[in-house]
Image (cartoon, coloured by chain):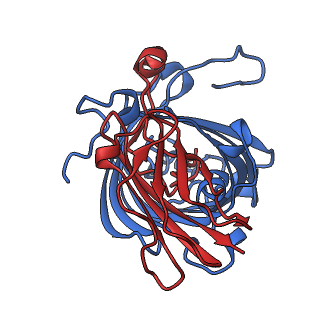
Chain colours: A blue, B red
Amino acid sequence: MLDTEGSKTEAGWENLVVTGKWQAYTNAPHEFVVSLGIIREIGGSATNHTGGDRFGSTAPTLYGGKGFGDIPVPLLQPFAVTGELGYTIADEELKQGEAPPPLATGQPTGGGFAPTFNNGNNNAWSAGISLQYSLPYLQSQVRDIGLDGFLGNLVPLVEFTWSSPASSPSTPGTSWIAAPGAIYMAQWGEVGVEALIPLNRTAGTNVGVVGLVHFFFDDLFPNSPLGRPIFQ
Amino acid sequence: MPPLAPQTIPRTRGRLLFATLPALLLLPAAAQAHAFLKRANPAVGSVVATPPSQVVIDFTEGVEPAFSSITVSDPAGHRVDRGAVHTAGGPSQLAVALRPLAPGRYRVRWHATATDTHKTEGSFAFTVR
């Protein structure tokens, strides 16, 4: 959704993003998993009038997750840490245009011209780490404290994300964001909402909100190929 | 926009996640699910004064007893259950009988196959005072 002062609010889709992920290492007793993935953003698939990017990108990404179920303090066992580190390779790299030619009078152009850029993007590093506390895990594996319904399906969490350009010109610079929120787990999927709190000026000056809905295709369509791993 | 919670899948669920609107429209009729522990007797993490004669687990979905199991181990790791599980109060409930229990902490491990063939597993402990 794009809300520009003086104009009507526009709504539309961001570019389509497809992720392939391979669960490379799993240690169930210690609740530890490492995955490798490729995130592909398909350029030009977004809604044009909301400013969708016409160039895509590819991001090899490393994922990790560790549950605390193997530590001896029961009430800390529902904690888990997850993280990811990715390097985004832009299809069209951001480049600064050449300076305008000298004026006909032979005078230099001086400093009155703003630099021009193509419509590309920087290559960039990005990372995220989340700390979460699973009430469903507490309820079913550690201690039944009588949480039913909504509360018993909630996973409070806080996430920190970082992104930094890896090529020049670097526009914008490094950004840090903290995102406290919660995920509601249902049998058919999950619904999450997080506040986006900028931690430096590059990340912005106002608090935002992000929401997400995931559908579990293997539960919604249990007897179909949807939602099954491609390779097992 | 940064992704929400890079890996927010609870540890008891291994799922493939996709975000799409049309699925929502099919939700009421199509939704079936993995079987997760809803309630247990003795309760998860509880301390009981009277040794239980069986462990009963209520699941969130119907389960297949022939392809599901509940094992109970004493503090030394020895099995104290009597083996085969049986349905107790309905298709979403499983139970296993126990040998006489001495005071101590017992570990319950369960594997469930839901009626839609999805497999889940988990464990919890209870203590006999």
Residue B34 horizontal side relative to residue A160, left or right: left
**Count of numbered circles in the view:** 0
User: Residue furthest toward the right?
Assistant: A206
Q: Residue at x 44, y 33 (%)?
A: B91
Q: Residue at x 66, y 54 (%)?
A: A139
Residue A33 is situated, as x and y percent measured from the top left of the image, at: 41, 67
Residue A153 is situated, as x and y percent measured from the top left of the image, at: 65, 43
Q: Residue at x 63, y 57 (%)?
A: B42
Residue A172 horizontal side relative to residue B81, left or right: right
In the image, B80 versus B124, the foreground residue is B80
Which quarter of the figure has residue A219?
A: top left
Taking the image as drawn, is residue A122 in sight? Answer: no
Residue A219 horizontal side relative to residue A24, left or right: right
Residue A197 is situated, as x and y percent measured from the top left of the image, at: 76, 52
In the image, A124 versus B41, the foreground residue is B41
Rendered-image quadrant of the C terminus of chain B: bottom right
Residue A71 horizontal side relative to residue B112, left or right: right
Placement of B72 over or under B63, stated as above or below: below
Residue A49 is situated, as x and y percent measured from the top left of the image, at: 53, 19
Which quarter of the figure has residue A79?
A: bottom right
Rendered-image quadrant of the N terminus of chain B: top right
In the image, B6 versus A182, the foreground residue is A182
In the image, A84 versus B26, the foreground residue is B26
User: Residue furthest toward the front?
Assistant: B100
